[in-house]
Image (spheres, rainbow, N blue to C red):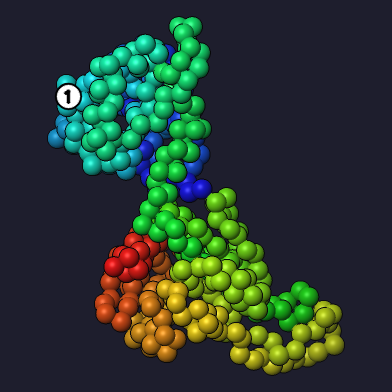
Amino acid sequence: MLNFSNKNILLCVTGGIAAYKAAEIIRLFKKDGADVRVIMTESAKEFITPLTLQAVSGNEIHDSLLDLKAESAMGHIELAKWADIILIAPCTAESIAKIVHGRADDLMGAVILASKASTYIAPAMNTTMWLDKGTQANYQTLLSRGINFIGPDEGEQACGDIGPGRLVEPDKIINLIKSHLNKGPLSGKTVTITAGPTREQIDPVRYISNNSSGKMGYALAEAAVQEGALVNLVSGPVVLAADKSINLFKINSAIEMLEAVNICMKSSDIFISCAAVADYKPSNYSDTKIKKENLDNLEINLEKNYDILSEVAEQFSSAYIVGFAAETSDVNLNAKKKLDSKNLNMIISNDVSDASIGFDSDENEVHVITSNETIFIKKDKKIRIAREILNIISTNINS
């Protein structure tokens, strides 16, 4: 399942006994790569201290509607624009009622009104309060406005009553938000992505390879999961970890990559060739280590390697085929030639002569090229570049 890398999570904590679970919610979000900021209502501070949540989140706690430290003293606008996701957990009956009526007399209310972020409410209150007709009417009103509710769970409560009203456990909250976000424009689609280099063995200890960290391919795999796709990642040797929801195929050589890709493509809708496949391989492999003491010079005959992208484009023509062109000169011109010669739907070009966006960099800058248009994506983190690329792909296949 996807993680929250590069996601901005705004956690709003209101005044209920379950507020102590906010620390665990923050920890789990941060473990999944999120940047977490916290708004506390005044009543929330009666149940857990701001210092505790500040220590766990690593960010200053927000509790004032007019924050003199914020730009133009308008902290609610800054937070509203910053947040990708707003989670109110625990959310009391009072807070639900205030949100229904659009109250903006505290920081949380003002931020919710000013934000376009996806909003989730995890209620926590006494069973009778949750089942009250007023609370249920408020609940239905917020659902009709597109607010997402997580729970409440049923069970024994702090007051001793048994029934619906318990805060959903933190790990379940995180997973439910993940599942909701996973329903993206690529839901129902299967994407196969290649990443990293290939190694073509000369002997058991030596090989020919290409420069590639695999970072762009792994970012594309993560972005595809976030768009709702089932993802196969065929990866050469890298030091990166893939999300557990990704079907990872580890390979070494080009032939191994081709074999894995052919298996995956039988059920795939999209193919993204991001791997740096070695163009050549040794004609002859020595099954024992070549001893340098026996040779003054070593000559290695090379032959052309498998062109995985061309073979996939030819064999699986019904799929949407995307290639990458890592170039050092005439970048877009060479990419367009590759687009035409290999009969691709799209090609991504990037200038690897620029060290700031080249091999092993955490950032990239690319042109997305189709037969109809060229879209420039300015320099940014590779995960953000990947998301933009996947957004363009999903637009093209769904149009």
Query: Which of 358/191 is in front?
Result: 191
Query: Which of 285/291 is in front?
Result: 285
In the rendered view, does 93 fall on the left or right side of 245?
left
Q: Categorize mark 1 by other alpha carbons within 10 Å: few (<14), some (14-19), many (20+).
A: few
From what the image shows, is residue 312 above or below residue 54? below
Residue at image mark 1: 101
Residue 180 seen anywhere in this rendered image of the structure: yes
Q: In which quarter of the image is residue 120?
A: top left
Residue 64 seen anywhere in this rendered image of the structure: no
User: Which residue is at 49% across, 6% downward?
Assistant: 160
User: Which residue is at 21% across, 21% downward?
Assistant: 98
Residue 245: x and y, percent? 55, 51
**Element assignment for label 1:** loop
Amino acid type of the residue tagged 1 in the rendering: His
In the rendered view, does 17 fall on the left or right side of 141?
right
From what the image shows, is residue 249 above or below residue 278? above
Q: Quick one: which residue is furthest to the left in this view?
A: 72
User: Which residue is at 32% across, 43% downward?
Assistant: 84
Residue 47: x and y, percent? 40, 13
Query: Which of 18/397 is in front?
Result: 397
From what the image shows, is residue 195 above or below residue 326? above
User: Which residue is at 34% across, 61% downward?
Assistant: 391
Q: In which quarter of the image is residue 151?
A: top left
Q: In which quarter of the image is the C terminus?
A: bottom left
